[in-house]
Image (tube, rainbow, N blue to C red):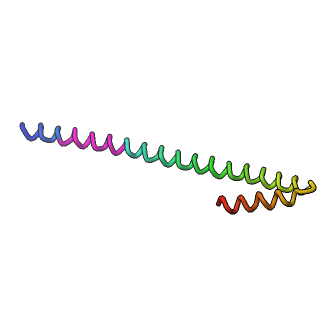
């Protein structure tokens, strides 16, 4: 009789452990999803801003002192990285 009570306690604790594992599994998947979203935003933003920077540097070359400004921009870019 008392052994049945012991098994129910073991089953309840096992069930709670499985629920915790499921919660951590969902949380881990959500963290992984957020990581990939962050990576996408980061690299797509770098691509867009890099393309705009190259377009601006090529457009400013047509001006009289454009080469000076583009060389200053390149130096600042290398210094910042």
Residue 51 pos. (x, y %): 77, 53
Principal SS element in the magenta part? helix
Quadrant containing the N terminus is: top left
| Residue 8 is covered by the magenta coloring | no
Say which of 11 and 45 sits in front: 45
Residue 55 pos. (x, y %): 83, 52
Residue 74 pos. (x, y %): 76, 60
Name the residue at 56% across, 49% down.
36
Say which of 1 and 55 sits in front: 55
Q: Which residues are magenta?
A: 10-22
Residue 11 pos. (x, y %): 21, 41
Q: Looking at the image, which residue sits at the far left?
A: 1
- Please identify the quarter of the rendering in which residue 22 is found: top left
**54 over 1 or under it: above or below:** below
Say which of 5 and 26 sits in front: 26
Q: Is residue 50 left or right of residue 41?
A: right
Q: Is residue 8 left or right of residue 26?
A: left
Name the residue at 71% across, 59% down.
77
């Amino acid at each position: 009789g008392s052994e049945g009570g012991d098994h129910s306690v073991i089953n309840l604790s096992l069930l709670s452990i499985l629920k915790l594992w499921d919660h951590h599994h969902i949380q881990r998947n959500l963290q992984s999803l957020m990581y990939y979203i962050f990576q996408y935003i980061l690299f797509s933003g770098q691509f867009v801003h890099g393309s705009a920077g190259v377009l601006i540097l090529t457009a400013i070359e047509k001006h009289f002192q454009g080469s000076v400004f583009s060389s200053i921009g390149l130096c600042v870019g290398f210094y910042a990285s």
